[in-house]
Image (cartoon, rainbow, N blue to C red):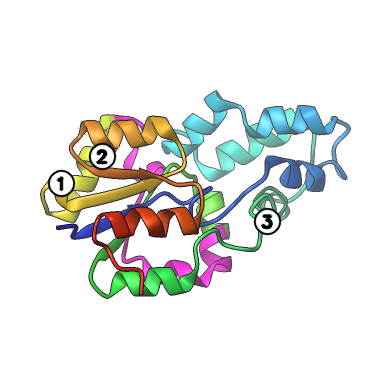
Amino acid sequence: MIDAIFFDLGKVIVDFDYFVGASALLKITPLSISEIVEILSDAALINEFETGSLSVMEYYHRASERLRIRVPLEAFQELWGSMFLPNPLVSEALLIALKKKHRLFLLSNTNEIHFRYVAERYPLLRHIEERILSFQVGCMKPDRKIFELAIRRAGVLPQEILFTDDRLDNIEAARACGIKAIQFSSEAQLIKDLQKLGISSD
């Protein structure tokens, strides 16, 4: 029986597009859109920020220097946050239905700027009771440590946890820890896979 359901955030609950954020930044930098996207998606820089190794101010200064921009932190946060698209990928109705019988958690690789931006703009996140965020816990998926932390936070056996994420490497890492996992592609697909596990979405 599934007690706890863990959701990834980006590309599962909310959608994002680096090119949307890059297009906003294009107005204030001499760089090309491809150069902006390359900086925003730089894995090394993202990993430092999303594991809490860089503070907001440190990331802001480093990214601003590479992007060749000079804007206040608040403006930078708005421009970079604009990569998140307005319509969630899962409905509030689904979260409400699942919450009737299961505890809902976030398990996300994210950073303080992005999470603050998303939390302020997506009211459906209030239905998720607990959050395990990479920048707060100092490790990222698919590292086994973050899944072991999720199991401890849930306080149940791994097989009593369900995890959904869009990335296959994260799905495989969760399964290696004994967690049931579904690779996310759409809400309709998720609902079908939940039904196969005996989990009602009504």
Amino acid identity at mark 3:
Glu
Residue ID for mark 2: 147
| Label 2 to label 3: alpha-carbon separation | 33 Å
Which marked residue is nearer to the observer: mark 3 or mark 1?
1
Residue at image coords 54%, 44%: 56
Residue ID for mark 1: 159
Which marked residue is nearer to the observer: mark 2 or mark 3?
2
Whether 10 is among the magenta residues is: no
Q: Is residue 155 left or right of residue 88?
A: left
Q: Is residue 76 above or below residue 119?
A: above
Q: Which mark is residue 49?
A: none
| Label 3 to label 1: alpha-carbon separation | 43 Å
Q: Is residue 10 above or below residue 91?
A: above
Residue ID for mark 3: 74
Residue stretch rendered in magenta on the structure:
118-143
Amino acid identity at mark 2:
Phe
Residue projecting furthest to the top: 44
Instruction: Compare marks 3 and 1 and give the one earlier in the sequence.
Output: 3
Residue at image coords 62%, 63%: 87
**Secondary structure of the residue carrying numbered label 1:** helix
- Residue 3 at least partly seen: yes
Dots 3 and 1: beta carbons under 8 Å? no
50 or 105: nearer the eye?
A: 105
Q: Toward which corner of the image does residue 106 lie, by quadrant? A: bottom left
51 or 100: nearer the eye?
A: 100
165 or 155: nearer the eye?
A: 165
